[in-house]
Each structure stands twice: as C-alpha cells, then as structure tokens.
Amino acid sequence: MDKVELMMKSIQKAFYHSSDFTVRQVDWRNGSSAILCFYASLVDAKEVQRILDTIYARLDTEKPFWSETLVSTLERFSLPQAVKRICNGETLIVLPNSGEMLSLTILNEVNRNPDEPNNEHILRGSHDGLIENLDTNLALLRKRINTPALVVKSFLIGKETNTKAYYLYMDGVIKPETLQELEKRIQAINIDYFYSMGQLSDELEDSVWSPFPQLLNTERPDRVVANLVEGKIVVMPNTSPAAIIAPVTFFNSSF
C-alpha cells in the first residue's frame, strides 16, 4: 500500500467513514497524486471542480503562486487542522508528497428556505426546519454539530423504490447496544415500495399497537441535535421533511 492510500485510509477513519464524506484520489502535477476530501452535504461540488480546473491551469504554466486565489489557502498538512477545516465546510486537497494541504472555501448554501415547521413553533431558538432534501438537512445539522463524531450512514428502503435514507449518531455518545439494535432492525426491513414515514416507523418500533411512544418524529434540526448529543439515533429518508428519533420514552415525547 503506497503513501497516498495510507493517508486516504487515515483520513476516512478520522471521519468515521460517514456516508456524506467524500475522499478520492486525483491526479496532480508530474504524475503524482493528491487527495480530495469534503462533506458533500456542505460543499458545492460543481464549484469545487471549477476551482480545481483553475488550479490545474496554473500548475501547467508552473506559476510560482499557483495556490493563491480568493478562496484557497496552502499550509502544512495536519490531520487535526484538516478535520477542523472540513467540518467548517471547506474542501481540502492533500498533497502527500510535499506534506501540504490546500483548503478551498466553497460553501453550499441552502437553496430552499427551510421554514419553521407549522406544528412545532417555538418562541426562542432557531426558526428553520428540515425539508425534503437529505443534503440540505445534513448541512443544517453539521452547522450545529461541528465535529466528525457526527456519523452518517446510508441505506436503501424498498426493493423497487430504492429510496435513499440515512441514520445518524454521535460516536462516543451512543450506546453500542442501541446502535446494534437499530442496525439490526434496518437490515430486517422487507418492503417493496416505500412511500411514507409511517411505514418506516412501523418497521422500527417494537409494537404498532403500543399506547406508549417508542419513536419521536420531528421537523426541527435543533431538536434533532438535542437528541443526538443525548445518545439517540436519528433516521431520515429522502422523501420527507421529518426525522425519526429513537429510542424515546414518554418524557422524551413532550420535549
């Protein structure tokens, strides 16, 4: 295994192999390789490619200040600093041969107003809400939890619909047995067509006939964050502005 592959594995491990974390090997100057990494939920990938094309053009002309643009910074590579920059929404190009990293500040602004949910109004705090777009929802959460310990894992629901969904948790906070139980229930989901949050709730809860709350539904990102940092798991499909929180008790349901 060469130096680039080892560094890629190290970076992926630092970000807990989250589904929305992108890391890939790209060609660099003189036949060498670089590592491109960013959170897909926080970055405009098309703009990243445009800036990369500009940098490649400067490299080809061997300009001494090829890295100097209004959105880029060249510095020595440091994994803690890399983690900090990526969590802040920056894109990194790591140069293993020189031990440097180029950071690009290209944020992906939310393209639709995440208005406050009609059924969850509050007097104090944030007034935005989840929408029917996973990347936007992840961006809302990552702006509130600025650490790679927020782990995102993807899965598909429905044999025919192949609806994309995520489950999220805080590494180091979630109880391993809780995570294992949820992953077991997700793997056991056996439906052909997914079309509603009710289906997902029925598949995850203990009993659909129980009078006591087993799952919590919310459209508020701040409520999602509050439960994540308390050791809960959050499940979000791509077709709904709501998130499912588990496990919960009667007291959690009134939060």
Image (tube, rainbow, N blue to C red):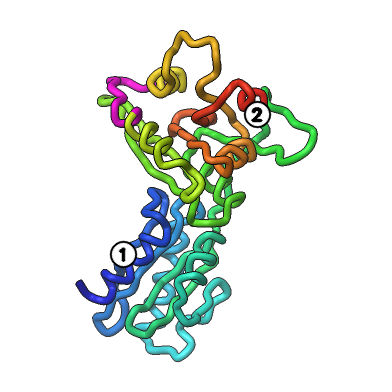
Amino acid on which disc 1 is placed: Lys
Q: Please give the range of residues in magenta.
A: 185-195
Compared with 24, 32 (above or below) is below
Crowd class of label 2 (few under 14; some 14 to 19; many from 20; radius 10 Å): some
Magenta region includes residue 193: yes
Look at label 2 and name its amino acid: Pro
User: Where's the N terminus, which quadrant?
Assistant: bottom left
Q: Are marks 2 and 1 in contact (CB under 8 Å)?
A: no
Identify the residue shown where x is 50% and y is 29%. 247
Residue 220 visible? The answer is yes
**Measuring 29% from the left and 26% from the top, which residue is drawn there?**
188
- Marks 2/1: CA–CA distance: 40 Å
Q: Nearer the viewer, mark 2 or mark 1?
A: 1
Extreme-left residue of the structure? 1
Q: Secondary structure at mark 2?
A: loop
One can see residue 244 in this view? no
Judge whether 198 appears above or below 36 on screen: above
Query: Which quadrant of the figure has residue 162?
Result: top left
Q: Is residue 242 magenta?
A: no
Callout 1: few (<14), some (14-19), or many (20+) C-alpha neighbours within 10 Å? few
Look at 74% across and 40% down and name the residue there.
125
Question: Quick one: label 2 or label 1, which is nearer the N terminus?
Answer: 1
Q: Which mark is residue 163?
A: none
Q: Which residue is mark 2?
A: 117
Q: Is residue 217 left or right of residue 207?
A: right
Residue placed under numbered mark 1 in the picture = 9
Q: Could you tell me residue 237's position as x and y percent?
A: 44, 32
Residue 76 in the image: x percent, y percent?
A: 47, 82
